[in-house]
Image (tube, rainbow, N blue to C red):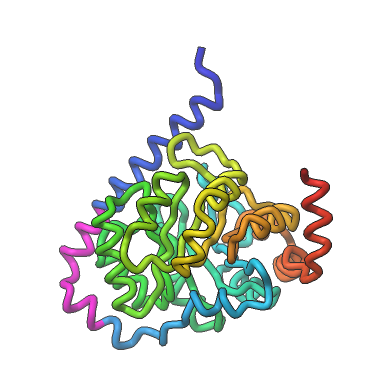
Amino acid sequence: MTYPSTIYNNRLQSMLKEIVWQKKLEVEQIQKEMSLASLQRQLTAAPTVRDLFTAIQQSLYRPSLIAEIRKTSLNQEIIRTEFEPIAIAKAYEGGGATCISVVTDQKFFQGGFEHLRAIRYRVTVPLLCKDFILNPCQIYLARAAGADAVLLIAAILTDQQIQNLTAVIHYLGMNAVIEVNNLAELDRVLKLDDTRIITINNRSWEDFTVDINITEQLMAQRRSHIQNLGILVLSESGIENSADLAFVADAGVNAVIMGEPLLKQEDITAAVRNFLKPDFPIYKDLLKKRN
């Protein structure tokens, strides 16, 4: 007998394959319409790069918040009816977010580089372009739109692809944020040259289950090695409140990526401030209650 959860997970797995297939088509279209030279020319008008790595290091909050802007959830349900990217970005910044993540996939998450471009001129914090990156042309478009960092997903890329794309991102002055979900992916990335920022996604791309303990487990096994390499670690998915923030902070992460729980609040600025309570003993008390 097939249960609804199984049907749901199978649909999501098919969705990931469809996303990658769609991205390949988009890359082909970009390459037909624009030469590398024309992509490079767009960079002459691009805003100055802001340093995501340094922003996280110098943040007043430990860990800091990378607040995410996206219109739909993974199952393509609308997260926030009144979706105004600029207003949301300003609310995030006003609440104390160190950086802002902007989902730019259009077909599946109703995002776009136009959101990134519009936000860039209204906030001062660094912007992370979050998409399914397969080719350097996507990176050039992200930089032209004002991205300061670009996400790379280990689950859909080979080691050589990660290495090549990271080199392009760093060449353009941005930071590559490499996403992993399990120990095998983490070890792959730790062996690569010039890895600077890793994000641990607590959602598995294999069955789409979410388990915040993944961050704790991976950090427990590789924390000293990561710190010796000077790599910053982020955590995302399954982080809903200050108790979760305390949990991943105790694991040793430098920042968290969080969007949906904040986007669902009427007053986003207040929601961010409440999430980033500076009194860390409160975090510890919440962590005790959680456990």
Q: Quadrant of residue 139?
A: bottom left
| Percent position of residue 69, x then y | 55, 63
Residue 113 visible (yes or no): no
- Looking at the image, which residue sits at the far top? 1
Q: Nearer the viewer, residue 188 or 180?
A: 188
Q: Is residue 215 left or right of residue 11?
A: right
| Percent position of residue 45, x then y | 33, 87
Q: Is residue 36 magenta?
A: yes
94 in relation to 205, above or below: below
Segment tinted magenta in the rendering: 25-41
Q: Is residue 124 magenta?
A: no
Residue 63 visible (yes or no): yes
| Percent position of residue 207, x then y | 47, 34
Quarter of the image containing the C terminus?
Answer: top right
Main SS category, magenta section = helix
84 in relation to 132, above or below: below
Q: Nearer the viewer, residue 108 or 12?
A: 12
